């Protein structure tokens, strides 16, 4: 079911896996934003809280990140603001703020 939900929102929403924002991951392991903008060990609940505070209407889906299928994880589908990269940086920045790191 989660997969079809994501397809329904293809142009207006993006999928955010925690790996996209993780400063401990390399680009080849899934990080999508520059290390200076990323955060260590982001959790799905943090992504949801950040997306809610940014009014991105988050939806949690049970799905594993394909590059790390052995790691149990969920993903969050959010409303896209400008570009995917811009939206990911916005979420990481909000998580940093919620953690009190910046």
Image (cartoon, rainbow, N blue to C red):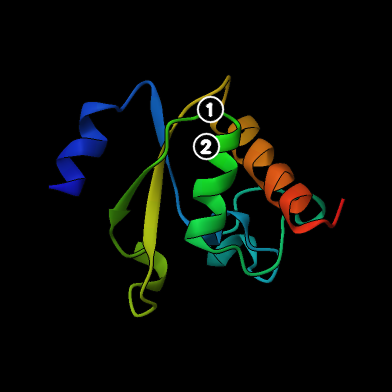
Point out residue 70 in the picture as x, y percentages from the top left corner.
Answer: 34, 80
Point out residue 62 in the picture as x, y percentages from the top left corner.
Answer: 27, 59
Kindly report the distance in space between the C-alpha atoms of the residues bearing marks 2 and 1: 5 Å
Compared across the picture, whether 100 is left or right of 38 comes to: right
Q: Locate residue 87: give its quadrant.
A: top right
Compared across the picture, whether 29 is left or right of 92 comes to: left
Residue at 82 percent across and 56 percent down: it is 100
Circles 2 and 1: CB atoms closer than 8 Å: yes
**Can you tell which mark lies on residue 55?**
1
52 or 81, nearer to the observer: 52
Residue at 21 percent across and 28 percent down: it is 8
Compared across the picture, whether 38 is left or right of 61 comes to: right
Compared across the picture, whether 84 is left or right of 90 comes to: left
Residue at 54 percent across and 64 percent down: it is 43
102 or 88, nearer to the observer: 102
Residue at 39 percent across and 29 percent down: it is 13
Q: Would you call the spot at circle 1 few (<14 residues within 10 Å), some (14-19), or many (20 or more)? A: few
Point out residue 30 in the picture as x, y percentages from the top left corner.
Answer: 53, 60
Point out residue 27 in the picture as x, y percentages from the top left corner.
Answer: 62, 60
**Can you tell which mark lies on residue 52?**
2
Mark 2 lies on a secondary structure that is: helix
Outermost residue toward the bottom in this view: 70
């Amino acid at each position: 079911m989660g997969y079809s939900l994501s397809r329904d929102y293809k142009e207006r929403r993006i999928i955010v896996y925690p790996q996209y924002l993780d400063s401990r991951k390399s680009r080849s392991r899934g990080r999508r934003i520059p290390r200076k903008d990323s955060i260590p060990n982001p959790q799905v609940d943090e992504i949801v809280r950040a997306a809610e505070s940014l009014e991105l209407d988050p939806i949690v889906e049970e799905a594993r990140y394909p590059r790390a299928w052995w790691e149990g994880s969920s993903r969050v589908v959010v409303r896209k603001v400008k570009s995917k990269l811009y939206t990911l940086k916005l979420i990481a920045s909000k998580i940093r703020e919620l953690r009190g790191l910046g």
